[in-house]
Amino acid sequence: MKEYILLMISAALVNNVILARFLGLCSFMGVTTRIDTAVGMGMATTFVITVSSMADWVVEAYLLQPYGLGYLRTVTFILVIAAAVQFTEMIVKKVSPPLFQMLGIYLPLITTNCAVLGVALLLVEGRMNFIGATLFAFASSIGYSMVMVIFAGLRERMALADIPRLFAGPPIGFIVASLLALAFMGFSGMSTS
Amino acid sequence: MGEFADSTTDFSAPAMVEGIAQVVAVEGNMAWLVPEQTSSCGACASASACGAKGIGTTASRLELRRFQLVNNSNLAVGERVIVGIRENALLRASITAYVIPLTTLLTAGALAQWAIGRDVVTMAAMFAGLALGLWFARIGAGRLLVRGDLAPRFLRRASAGETCNLE
């Protein structure tokens, strides 16, 4: 139990997908202009990363490894992720068409999010069991969503600040992101003893 | 930039998420609209280099998101209007669609792993948990729909040249 909790803390905070591994930076800068879009994107990405990582683990364990097809890993995982996004879209549409109308905009954006593929490839490196891989993917995506929401909140505050014209927009966004990454580096000093 | 909210801003009013939509049909006192905003990032200045550009923007995709409004304002086909939904409605919808199924999926998987400890059983339990969660989500979405939380509201007509980047 303790090892799973440490795995999740490590994935969400210490090795944060955005601030430590630099994955998903396009959505990090593009979808964080408002908190509501960041929350919507974060939750959709959390669902897709968790589901697609589970599918990727199954494909890796029962198809790629036994038949020595490791060289097809990246292509296969991209296919699985695209299928997972499509599956999620179909399910949301089936469960509730009004929900799909409201949230459907975020789903196609996830297909091009490198964090989804990055987490799936990290699972292979980690050689985890199924539940470990699922919890790692879930915690990684929670870390992604958390940073998205924090950064969106900071950007909403910055919109009201008197920022010099030279720094306005993406430049001050990148400076704040680097300060946030420095703050998250503090988690690497955590100890369990 | 550099402008502060004026003193007349009503911060007690529920925050709305706004977007532009175009009226594509009028049937009796109902109007059919298609959202104009093409991506959640609002198509930024670096759109030409962005991988998200073009995804979710084709006519067929936008047509899938066609929605209906009561036409109290005499809207005509081709008019551009600003529609909005309450900010907390978006949060509730996201929780209903994603958090509920994910919670049941992970709970079922954790219980199966703790009780039996075999990957195949855990996978089956997670699949069952996901199905159960989607069923709960369907019930939750039905409740949101009955309360009218999922329906966009007409706010005003868009002025000429108004873009989807509403900030």
Image (spheres, coloured by chain):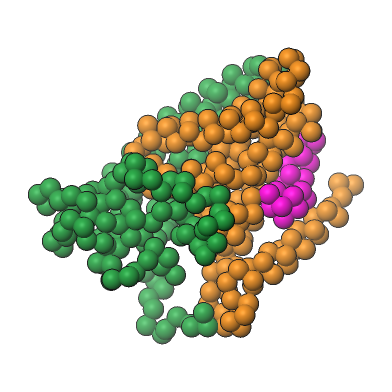
Chain colours: A orange, B green
Mark count = 0
Q: Position of residue B155 (x, y in %)?
A: 27, 64
Q: Residue at x 37, y 83 (%)?
A: B8
User: Is there any visible trace of residue B24 in the rendered image?
Assistant: yes
Where residue B48 appears, as percent x and y from the top left, is 53, 57
Percent across and percent down for residue B33 are 25, 51
Q: Position of residue B62 (x, y in %)?
A: 35, 46
Side of B21 relative to B3 (left or right): left
Q: Where is residue B60, by image quadrant?
A: top left
| Residue B103 seen in the figure | no
Location of residue A8 with respect to A53 vertically, above or below: below
Closer to us: A24 or B96: A24
Dividing the picture into quarters, in which one does residue A120 lie?
A: top right
**Residue in the image at 55% along x and 58% along y:** A30
Q: Quadrant of the N terminus of chain A?
A: top right
Compared to A24, does B120 lie above or below? above
The magenta stretch is A1-23
Spot the residue most to the right: A193
